[in-house]
Image (tube, rainbow, N blue to C red):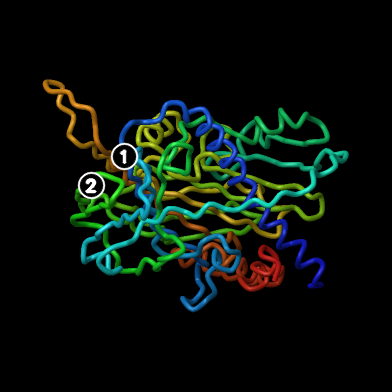
Amino acid sequence: MSRKKRLCSCNVMLALFFIPWAVVLVRTEAAFAADKDAKPAVTRYWMSIATEKSSIPGMPEGMPDIGGMFGVGGSGKRLLLQLNSPRPLPAQPKATHDIPPGQNMGDTLPLLTPERERHEASEPATPGKMEKPKMRMLIYWGCGDTVGKGQPRVLDTEKMSLTDFGKAMAGRSVSRQIPPAPSSGWLYADWPNRDNSTTVPKNSSLAGSHFVHGNYLPDIRFSIDEKHDFMAPVEFTSVQGGPEDAIRFQWRGIPTATGYYAMAMGHDQNSGTMIIWSSSELPEPGYSLMDYLPDEEVQRMIRDKVVMSPSINQCTIPKGVFKDAEGAMLQFIAYGDELNIVYPPRDPAKPKDPIWTVKARRKSTGMLPLMAMEGHKETKSSNRRDADEEKASAEQKGLTPGKVLRGILGF
């Protein structure tokens, strides 16, 4: 593959992953701007707890991590601590989070206030003529062997306004969470930061007593139970089929999951068309659902048949969805229920204004290349010959793991 084609392919795949998060970012910033005037008069502390797994079925453990190769995370446990305090900033602000021994990250994690960036004056840019971007998308949805009626939904910037295109891309409206963030009149601190960015070890556990304290916030003491610890990683137990077939995938149930959602993206290089599929039973691009969601939103999405219930452990991408793509990438999320603590505890008989609140939100995500790995494995002896022939045919077409990875990822 030429260097020019390789760079083009990489750029396409990067766009597939970063465009959705750009849409979510715009939504979140808009929500934050609308909520700035309704600031709580309490200290807020958030723990964003994530488990990430990127895998290639049938490949040895020593293979490079897919997410790490493209700078989008990779496998492992992730932790983000964020604090907002209404108290004045002291001359030498100090805050830290004392952690339980089972977290295996030392005794405490320092919370730091970010340094203000200096913006140097620059000459105003001369406004130029903006060309309308050219983008075409095919959107499919639903688990099943065959494509449902009325699919795909076609989005084309050459045939619709950018406003209509953006609305179609946005998908289902959900209540976005607004975590603590730098804001006028509020103190903000977080971890990881410039002084400490310790990697969360594989055997880390959050279960136990926690103590957040400093010279610009009240003492915050709370405990995390095993049910609100890091979630188990996403483990795909079976993946059958290839881009030209129905792709059946199964996963191991996660005990603390409250629901599941999957979406896949591929690219037809010949026509320049992006192909998107989601597990929702209703039309849904899925961008707004691939992140932390409030518990009530997950339950609402299950009732609306958009999110899969925690009892489900398999799904099929209909045949032909990715037939014109060299391959596709599946993104999968398991939602976990939140731990919300208010101090002092709410008592209807003796109502008191809260002093601090804690939110521990959780998710487990997976990333998986979709390719013809081993054909359709059948348990009946009469079908073994057909399975072997399918595998040989796939290899002749270039659908071996290495070749398909090079096609999807551009290396």
Which of the labelled discs sits on residue 361, or is there none? Answer: none
What amino acid type is highlighted by mark number 1? Thr
Characterize the local packing of mark 1: few (<14), some (14-19) or many (20 or more) Cα atoms within 10 angstroms: many
Nearer the observer, 79 or 329: 79
Element at label 2: strand
On-image quarter of the N terminus: bottom right
Residue linked to disc 2: 220
Residue linked to disc 1: 43
N-terminal label among 2 and 1 = 1
Nearer the observer, 245 or 291: 291
Please identify the residue farthest to the left as the structure is shown. 349
The x, y position of residue 166, in whole percent, is 68, 33
What residue is drawn where x is 60% and y is 64%?
70
Marks 2,1: beta carbons within 8 A = yes
Kindly indicate the quadrant of the structure image that contains residue 201: bottom left
**Cα–Cα gap, marks 2 and 1:** 9 Å
Please identify the residue farthest to the top as the structure is shown. 349
Kindly indicate the quadrant of the structure image that contains residue 199: bottom left
The x, y position of residue 208, in whole percent, is 19, 57
Element at label 1: strand
What residue is drawn where x is 24% and y is 32%?
354
What amino acid type is highlighted by mark number 2? Ile
The x, y position of residue 240, in whole percent, is 53, 59
What residue is drawn where x is 66% and y is 57%?
14
Kindly indicate the quadrant of the structure image that contains residue 374: bottom right
Would residue 229 be found to the left or right of residue 60 on screen?
Answer: left
